[in-house]
Amino acid sequence: MHCAENEILNLSVMKKGMTNHSYHFQIKGDGRYILRIPGEGTSSTINRAEEAAAFRAIRPYNICDAPIYFDPNTGYKVTRFLNHIRVCNPHNENDLLKCMELLRYFHALNLSVPHEFNLTEKITLYEDLYRSNGNPGSYDDYLRTKANVISLQDYIASIDKSYCLSHIDSVCDNFLFYRDSDREDEKLQLSDWEYAGMQDPHVDIAMFCIYSSYCKDDCDRLIDLYFKGQCNAETRAKIYCYISTSGLLWSNWCEYKKCFNVTFGDYATKQYLYAKEFYHHAIELIKTIK
């Protein structure tokens, strides 16, 4: 920050996120900033060089503020502090319209990076990590649930799809509304790109749904907003498949976090239930298509 240590003021805990820890600080005579420090176990699950590649890809497009400092070895990141900030309310129609507009804009850019985020490979990675750390898993029917989820991949593979840089963690809390001053209109950015990689961009819709604890009707409503009412049955079924797959993905991620005494309560259970319930929703819709 090109300053003396005694010019760093008011360092305080901002939040303890699900993946990282964030701190607020000020520079005397300059401004306010946020320091991100990776949380427990992230070195095994996140490639910070890949995160840096995602930031380079989106830098020209006004989707997210570029980091002021980023170390791809440690994952330490400094960004500017956003004023008058709030996150997306996943039950507010106006917020959802704006967030889906930004998400469509990002997807339409068709950006590329050298790495992908492979859902089934990550499911296996997180499972291997938590089992190798002595956690046998929380669910008696896990193997059946996993087999069901894996079976959906044949349908996903059968559907024509685009493949571009996708956010992967496109949840309501990462859509940030802010204003630089009281007199300005709200701006919107999509933050936290540490999971971003090449993937079907419709995975991002599924991720928004499951973090927001949406019921099936809410999921359908969000799908309709993203596609402006023009989503065909094949694509909707594919997104149901992604909801199921992503639920198992984050359920396994939560199991790994438990190895570090980091737990997420109902969130972890809900993710597992998405894996089970949307498997059946997907199968039912696929039957009507065939």
Image (cartoon, rainbow, N blue to C red):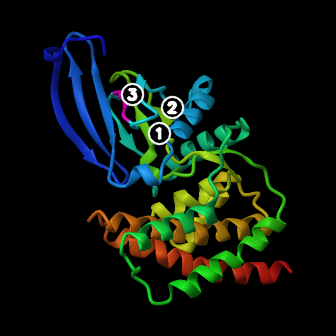
Q: Which mark is residue 64?
A: 2
* In the foreground, 205 or 247: 247
> Up-down: is 36 above or below 81?
below
Residue 2, image x and y in percent? 29, 11
**The disc labelled 1 sits on which kind of residue?**
Ser
- Foreground disc of the pair 1, 3: 1
* In the foreground, 282 or 111: 111
Q: Which residue is mark 3?
A: 179
Label 2 sits on a secondary structure element that is loop
Pointer 2 or 1: first along the chain: 2
Residue 274, image x and y in percent? 52, 74
Instruction: Say few, some or many: other residues with alpha carbon within 10 Å of mark 1 (under 14 / 14 to 19 / 20 or more).
Output: some
Q: Is residue 89 visible?
A: no
**The disc labelled 3 sits on which kind of residue?**
Arg
> Up-down: is 87 above or below 254?
above
Seen at 82% across and 64% down, the residue is 159
Whole-angstrom CA distance, mark 2 to mark 1, is 6 Å
Q: Which mark is residue 191?
A: 1
- Magenta residues, start to end: 76-80
Magenta-span inclusion, residue 77: yes
